[in-house]
Amino acid sequence: MIDNFETHTRDVLVIGAGGAGLRAAIEARDQGLSVGVVCKSLLGKAHTVMAEGGVAAALANVDEADDWKTHFRDTMQGGKLLNNWRMAELHAREAPERVRELERWGAVFDRTPDGRILQRAFGGHTHKRLAHVGDRTGLEMIRTLQDRAVAVGVDVFMECTVTRLLKDGDRVAGAFAYWRESGRFAVFRARAVVLATGGIGKAYRITSNSWEYTADGHVLAWEAGAELIDMEFVQFHPTGMVWPPGVMGILVTEAVRGEGGMLRNAEGFRFMERYDPERMELSTRDQVARAIYTEVKEGRGSPHGGVFLDISHKPADYVKTKLPSMYHQFLELADVDITRAPMEVGPTTHYVMGGVRVEADTGASTVPGLFAAGEVAGGMHGANRLGGNSLSDLLVFGRRAGLGAAEFARGSATTSTDPDPDTIRQASAELLAPFEQDGENPYALHRELQSVMQKNVGIFRTREDLERGLEEVRALGARARNVRVEGSRHFNPGWHLARDLRSMLVISEAVASSAILREESRGAHSRLDFPALDERLGTVNSVVTNEGGAVRVTQKPKAEIPAELRALLEKPAAAKPAVNAPSDEKPRKIAEAKGGSTDSRP
């Protein structure tokens, strides 16, 4: 059966070509193995590019007091101690070397006057810790990593979607996929597979994520028998664009606040004084997102349902130098000059802390031969991710997953990698089914799903909303089994969405079910009916498993933090986060400018 399909064989197969996937591929290739990278879109078109503000690493180039211990503490406290402590430790220890390694490979960072890598402040970080390239850090990282991957001989298969992991007994032995352009099927045989597919944002209506983020890797792993953890923790970035409607949700980097941007409501009041007077705009993302949501809910929002983020008090040349992408983004998309006027911003679905349960040191999942790194992997960020930690996360654990996969593949040299023909037949039939049945439009179902998740499983949650949302998601899942698409397999986006829809429905059920089970408020998970943090639930992970094709969620104890690391979590009284200095200005009314955009300065 396998001979009837286009077939590719590599020692290690990496699914996803963002920062984590490329770093994993580079490491596996450096171990002397053959490596293939399959990506849903084009090489370079990755969400790593959207991480604009910087990469968090305790280089201590600006604040000499910074070290890995402080970074570890910030990460754990930001994650409300739900983090996999070993991942947080490895991340804090190894991030500086991974950044310096990136520089050796050609990455160009902004510089201090004496020539060292410049670092800026970011929410939740005690020190100025984010190495950056203006507000285009992710773009520079992807450029560097993809150049390195090509140079070392990694093979890249672009515009190819993986729909199923193939197994040989209990171990993963490759993947089944199709070419998005032609619809032709392909089989990838491999001794080890690394998932680096990113997140789940397209299950929500307002999101910074683009079309690729449809929970592919999460559901591939779940279908193969791997465990997912902490899926209730979905991060809503505080600042996405809110106007005009066509760009709603597009990310406004935290670097704007890191460089001195202030958040004000419609009354001109710098409202973070109410919610976190110590850290102000550089509070953690969950805090800022909830603060903005509350200001809007209570009638103090901007004309288009957000708040105002103002950097115009800084010199125009400073803004254009430090935040070039933001300057051009607002000028071109919203007709707003941010050197003269504030931006209208609001929360947008941005990142999921939950993902595949992995071993910290190797990135290995609970299924032999399957590894994961980056946003698709759970544990590192606990209940809430600090800004900038995603880029250092993908460098540290991309490398470790690539190394772990290479070592597993090398140890499996005599093991058959021929996948089961019946599995291939079934995967083919599932993909072709929408052409052969009567049913509903995948676009309509996707819009309904996004509306359900936005309304019921958003920033603030209640059991009533969550249970209603879960019921509606399951009903949509039943309807989606008979989804229909027209036309052929060539250039057919409706067919692509029909496949993606199934993954988004599974993961939406996992998110809602996990959120119902966690009866507390912790990090990005806020329950109005359980507003307090429950210390007992700080010792358990929500675990999602596949029970005969059904989503099952339980709670299992997490590993205890060793005493020597727990001692680091006590924050010294003298250590205070770098914040934007409080403004001496009195609150002023912000007027709505002609044409609906905000042109007057607060």
Image (spheres, helix red, strand yellow):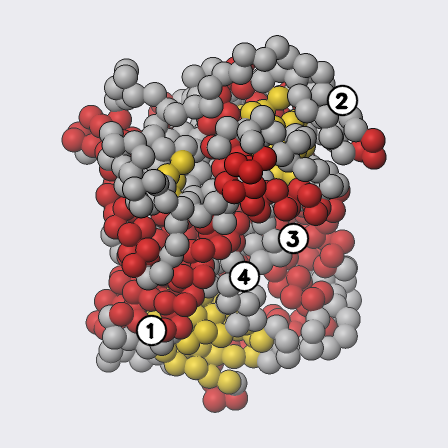
Q: Which residue is mark 4?
A: 45
Residue 78 figure quarter = top left
Residue 302: x %, y % from top left: 71, 26
Which residue: 40% across, 29% down?
A: 124
Of pointers 3 and 1, the one earlier in the residue sequence: 1
Foreground label between 2 and 1: 2
Q: Amino acid at mark 1?
A: Val
Q: What kind of element bears circle 2?
A: loop
Q: Which quadrant would the C terminus be assigned to in this image?
A: top right
| Disc 3 and disc 4 in contact, CB within 8 angstroms | no
As rendered, which of 212 and 177 lies closer to the eye? Answer: 212
Left/right placement of residue 600 relative to residue 351 reads right
Q: What kind of element bears circle 4?
A: loop
Foreground label between 3 and 2: 2
Q: Which residue is mark 2?
A: 591
Residue 516: x %, y % from top left: 53, 33
Residue 208: x %, y % from top left: 60, 45
Query: Eyeballing the image, is 179 above or below 329?
Result: below
Of pointers 4 and 2, the one earlier in the residue sequence: 4
Q: CA distance from mark 4 to mark 1?
A: 20 Å
| Disc 3 and disc 1 in contact, CB within 8 angstroms | no
Q: Which residue is mark 1?
A: 152
Foreground label between 3 and 1: 1
Mark count: 4
Graded by Cα atoms within 10 Å as few (under 14), some (14 to 19) or many (20 or more), the crowding at tag 2 reads: some
Q: Which residue is mark 3?
A: 477
